[in-house]
Image: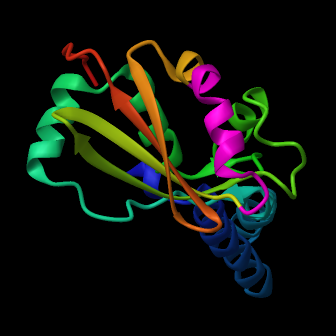
Amino acid sequence: MLRQTSLGTLGLFIGGLLTLTGFVAYATDNATLNLVGFFYGIPVLLGGLALKASELKPIDLSEPTSAPVLNLREVQATPTQNQIRKDVMRYRYGQKAHLDSSLESLGLSPTDEDRPLLTGLRETEANGAYTLVLEFDSPFISLEKWQQKREKIEKFFGPGIRVEFTQPDEDRIDVALIATQPEAVPQ
């Protein structure tokens, strides 16, 4: 549950509540609550503002995962697939985009403006194998450029990963990370 909770919003709420309590206590000459409100409330409020300013919202599943695919995930998903799924489905702080450092390492992020943006995620099955599909908005990086990086992407996210690309729309690239070894991996 904490993965789906914005720490920035939580900090703003608690800090605002403590600060407001400090102001009310100051107006009613309650020195103890006044100190608690000001000495704890204002720093927590400022921390919440800082977190909110650097917050990267989680990516949602673009379609619900079926029960058979969930069973496949438990049996076949690689640690990398599980880590990617968990990382992009929670709030992140201090990053410009999901998977930004990975895209940069792969040579798919020439500048911040040209970087493909992860917009969706879905779990499917491809020929009996668990598949994690990353949906990118990629207006500046062509499908050909993605395909040229296939081997590098497979090594980067591997072992046990095969990569396939599709282009459902002109500016969208779907990257399918397909599990190739049906080993049970603990989550």
Q: Position of residue 62 (x, y in %)?
A: 38, 65
Q: Which of these two is toward me, 143 or 13?
A: 143
User: What's the residue at 35%, 22% (across, down)?
Assistant: 78
Q: Position of residue 61 (x, y in %)?
A: 38, 60
User: What's the residue at 17%, 42% (across, down)?
Assistant: 70
Q: Is residue 171 left or right of residue 66?
A: right
Question: Taking 116 as reference, is 22 above or below it?
Answer: below
| Residue 40 appearing in the image | no
Residue 72's quadrant in the figure? top left
User: What's the residue at 76%, 27% (across, down)?
Assistant: 105
Q: Position of residue 108 (x, y in %)?
A: 76, 39
Q: Which of these two is toward me, 102 or 34?
A: 102
Which region is colored magenta? 139-153
Q: Is residue 184 left or right of residue 152?
A: left
Q: Position of residue 126 (x, y in %)?
A: 25, 40
Q: Is residue 76 left or right of residue 106?
A: left
Question: Taking 125 as reference, is 107 above or below it?
Answer: above
Q: Main secondary structure of the magenta part?
A: helix
| Residue 68 appearing in the image | yes
Q: Which of these two is toward me, 54 or 86?
A: 86
102 falls in the magenta region: no
